[in-house]
Amino acid sequence: MVVQGILSYMVTKMRIILFGYTSAAASIMDIVARTGNEIIALVLPSNRKGPEIDIAREAARRRKIEFLFQPPNPPAEDFIVKLQSFKPDLGIVFSYSQIL
């Protein structure tokens, strides 16, 4: 609820990239969407597999949010260029297991 409270006070609506996985992803997407801000992508850590990743990926698919996996070995220039191409205003990191 803290995220919702902070984001709802923003005058300019933001373009947000989420970094995370687990079942929390769907809840965080809902909270951010209620604030009127735009979720432009979900970044998933490439060092995780299984149902927690599947849940987050499916939550993004249902909401028509693009998702991508962070490459396992930084620096990943193509990945950085892709993130920059979204022109985000904010990144929200939660339940993330990889160095950004």
Image: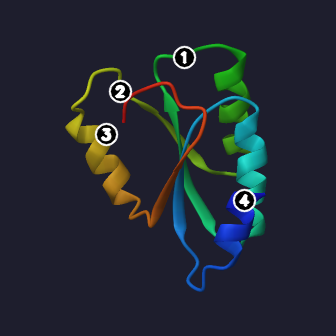
Q: Earlier in the sequence, mark 3 or mark 2?
A: 2
- Which residue position holds label 4? 2
- Amino acid of disc 4: Val
Q: Assess whether mark 1 and mark 3 are in contact (beta carbons under 8 angstroms).
A: no
Q: Decide if residue 82 is on the left or right side of residue 75.
A: right
Checking the image for residue 71, the label placed there is 2
- Amino acid of disc 2: Pro
Checking the image for residue 79, the label placed there is 3
* Observer-nearest of 81 and 52: 52
* Observer-nearest of 63 and 73: 73
Compared with 68, 36 (above or below) is below
Q: Earlier in the sequence, mark 1 or mark 2?
A: 1
- Amino acid of disc 3: Phe
Counting other residues with Cα less than 10 Å from the Cα at mark 3, is it few (<14), some (14-19), or many (20 or more)? some
In percent of the image, x 58 and y 36: which residue is there?
A: 20
- Which residue position holds label 1? 48
- Expressed as whole percent of the image width and height from the top left, the position of residue 85 reads 34, 58
Q: Decide if residue 84 is on the left or right side of residue 7.
A: left
In three-dimensional space, the C-alpha distance between marks 1 and 2, rounded to whole angstroms, equals: 12 Å
- Expressed as whole percent of the image width and height from the top left, the position of residue 75 reads 21, 32
Asked which quadrant contains residue 53, the reply is: top right
Q: Secondary structure at mark 4?
A: helix
Q: Assess whether mark 2 and mark 3 are in contact (beta carbons under 8 angstroms).
A: yes
- Expressed as whole percent of the image width and height from the top left, the position of residue 36 reads 70, 73
In three-dimensional space, the C-alpha distance between marks 3 and 1, rounded to whole angstroms, equals: 18 Å
Image quarter (top left, top right, bottom left or bottom right) of the N terminus: bottom right
Q: Looking at the image, is mark 1 or mark 4 nearer the viewer?
A: 4
Counting other residues with Cα less than 10 Å from the Cα at mark 4, is it few (<14), some (14-19), or many (20 or more)? few
Compared with 70, 1 (above or below) is below
- Amino acid of disc 1: Arg
